[in-house]
């Protein structure tokens, strides 16, 4: 990239002044590499996978293959499947009644996070219209299951 900028600058100077004198440092882009250096360059890896690439590929493979949900995601998925189209707060209230211990395990924010994961996996979607939540009385998004486990 540096060579490209230098060569563009060189061409601009030649256009302005009509002279190439004083610009010998910018002609290095025309040089060829030695055979040894060229062979080492050709043999070198062009990209090295990093930890982030491996994580990204793992997520993609999870989306492509059958998804193995973690325990919390599976519980939230089953609750949405059992209750039908419902809000995060309604599912939170249901799960608090079903699993009273630990006390703060099934807050609405936890259900919201698991709902987000399920949407990334393509297992949940928003219903067409918003409605009034039976718990909070606010107008909220209603979520529904797209597919069920073991659907055949």
Image (cartoon, rainbow, N blue to C red):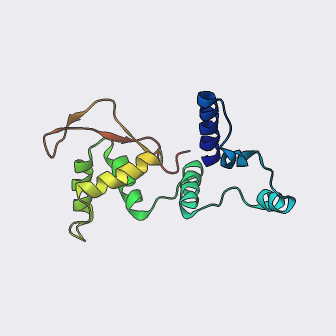
Q: Nearer the viewer, residue 117 or 86?
A: 117
Picture coordinates of residue 39 (x, y %)? 83, 59
Picture coordinates of residue 70 (x, y %)? 44, 62
The residue lying furthest to the left in this view is: 137
Picture coordinates of residue 143 (x, y %)? 33, 41
Along the horizontal axis of the image, is 39 left or right of 89? right
Q: Is residue 12 above or below residue 106?
A: above
The residue lying furthest to the bottom in this view is: 102
Along the horizontal axis of the image, is 17 left or right of 109? right
Picture coordinates of residue 95 (x, y %)? 27, 58
At 29% from the left and 58% from the top, the residue drawn is 110
At 27% from the left and 48% from the top, the residue drawn is 88
Q: Quadrant of residue 131?
A: top left
Q: Nearer the viewer, residue 83 or 44?
A: 44
The residue lying furthest to the right in this view is: 35
Q: How many marks?
A: 0
Q: Is residue 138 above or below residue 74?
A: above
At 41% from the left and 64% from the top, the residue drawn is 71
Q: Nearer the viewer, residue 140 or 49?
A: 49
Q: Is residue 24 above or below residue 38?
A: above
Along the horizontal axis of the image, is 83 left or right of 68? left
Q: Nearer the viewer, residue 97 or 121?
A: 121
Q: Quadrant of the C terminus?
A: top right
Along the horizontal axis of the image, is 136 left or right of 144? left
């Amino acid at each position: 990239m540096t060579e490209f900028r230098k060569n563009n600058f060189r061409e601009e100077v030649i256009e302005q002044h009509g002279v190439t004198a004083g610009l010998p440092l910018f002609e290095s882009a025309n040089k060829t590499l030695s055979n040894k250096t060229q062979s080492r360059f050709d043999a070198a890896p062009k990209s090295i996978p990093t930890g982030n690439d491996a994580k990204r590929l793992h997520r993609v493979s999870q989306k492509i293959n059958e998804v193995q949900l973690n325990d919390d995601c599976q519980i939230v998925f089953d609750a949405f499947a059992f209750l039908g189209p419902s809000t995060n707060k309604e599912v939170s209230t249901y799960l608090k009644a079903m699993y009273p211990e630990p006390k703060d395990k099934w807050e609405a924010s936890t259900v919201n996070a698991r709902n987000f994961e399920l949407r990334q996996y393509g297992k949940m979607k928003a219903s067409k219209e918003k409605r009034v939540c039976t718990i909070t009385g606010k107008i909220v998004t209603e979520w529904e299951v797209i597919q069920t486990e073991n659907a055949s």
